[in-house]
Amino acid sequence: MNIKAKYALTDELIIQIEALEGVPIDSVQYSINDKPLSTGLVHDIIRYSLKNEKFGKQILKAKVYRKSEIEDVAVNFDILPAEAPSKLSYQVINIYPHDIKAFTQGLEFYKDNLVESTGNGTTVSDKHGISSVRIVNPKTGEVLKIAELDETIFGEGATVLNNKLYQLTYKNNEAYVYDVNTLKRIGRFPYFQNMEGWGLTNDGTNLYMTDGSEKIYTINPINFNRSNEITVASDERLVTGTNEMEWVKGKIYANFFMTNMIGIIEPKTGTIEAVLDLSELRQKVTQHIDLDVLNGIAYNKKSDTFFITGKNWDKIFEIKIVNEII
């Protein structure tokens, strides 16, 4: 089968099995991801539109029948977006103080304050952060309220939905639920499968969760069951490491692990539609041995600006995304 390594959703597969000389073929049965496509003769050309498939790795199989023999043939390929992400630029509007000891894992506005989750990651100087959820004054950096986790638990992404604060854990395979006004823990949910917890956001109805892979999972907030998933992809590859996330105007704004980049992801398909390089912000904070990457994205609806910080950053930057770089 003459199959390329990469296709777009607008493409179609053109499939044909070539018979070897002196080895006649009775028929061929095709499937994609174990979904039957068609059965044809050896000379038949099968055309299959990819428009209803999802981004990610695909397996095309052919079951070849020769008299009493059956041969299985398989080819792997990826479906990726057809167009490259656009590149965005930004302006710094304000700079505010931030707790330099906060190993930030999640950041989100709730009313006029920030909800921040932190982890107990080990730094270069071998110091451990404190896993917590906290309410923070966005302009002074003052921690107004805090709930700390057990020192054995690595806190991860967090989001607020229906006055409940949901927080992931990195390795404990469970999420915690708090009353957002008191930070009293009121529940916990096991993950729907054995996995790591990374980023978390919501669209007003559902939660969206990542685990370090190329997947973003849609989660029911009532029972933490998975209802859907998408694969994050650019025109070049499947993209792993989607981390801190923010839902803004129907799109997912996400940081990618170990980078200072933000991608704007279409939540129905997983397409990375645009990217924003915030590397310069890291150079504007106090440089110290335990400084780590960007990992906090909070959208302020009132000002239409973003509040950006990172792990062990001593500043939060209020920025406005201004235009596309041509």
Image: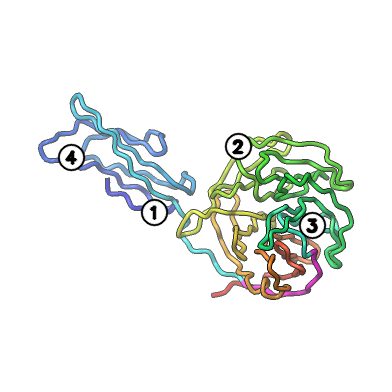
Task: Find the distance from the CA under tag 1 to the CA under tag 4.
Answer: 25 Å
Who is closer to the viewer here, 99 or 157?
99
Q: Which residue shows up at 86% across the image and 67% down it?
A: 140
Looking at the rendered structure, the kind of residue marked 1 is: Lys
* In this view, the mark in front (2 or 1): 2
Who is closer to the viewer here, 271 or 129?
129
Q: Earlier in the sequence, mark 3 or mark 4?
A: 4
Q: How many marks?
A: 4
Task: Estimate the x, y position of residue 313 in percent, counting from the top left.
Answer: 73, 66
Q: Which residue shows up at 56% across the image and 61% down it?
A: 273
The magenta segment is 89-99
Q: Which residue shows up at 48% across the image and 56% down it?
A: 81
Figure check: 259 above or below 195: below
Q: Earlier in the sequence, mark 2 or mark 1?
A: 1
Task: Estimate the x, y position of residue 213 in percent, counting from the top left.
Answer: 55, 48
Task: Find the distance from the CA under tag 1 to the CA under tag 3.
Answer: 39 Å
Q: Can residue 194 be seen in this snapshot?
A: yes
Image color mode: rainbow
Q: Earlier in the sequence, mark 2 or mark 3?
A: 3
**What residue does disc 2 label?**
194
Looking at the rendered structure, the kind of residue marked 4 is: Ala
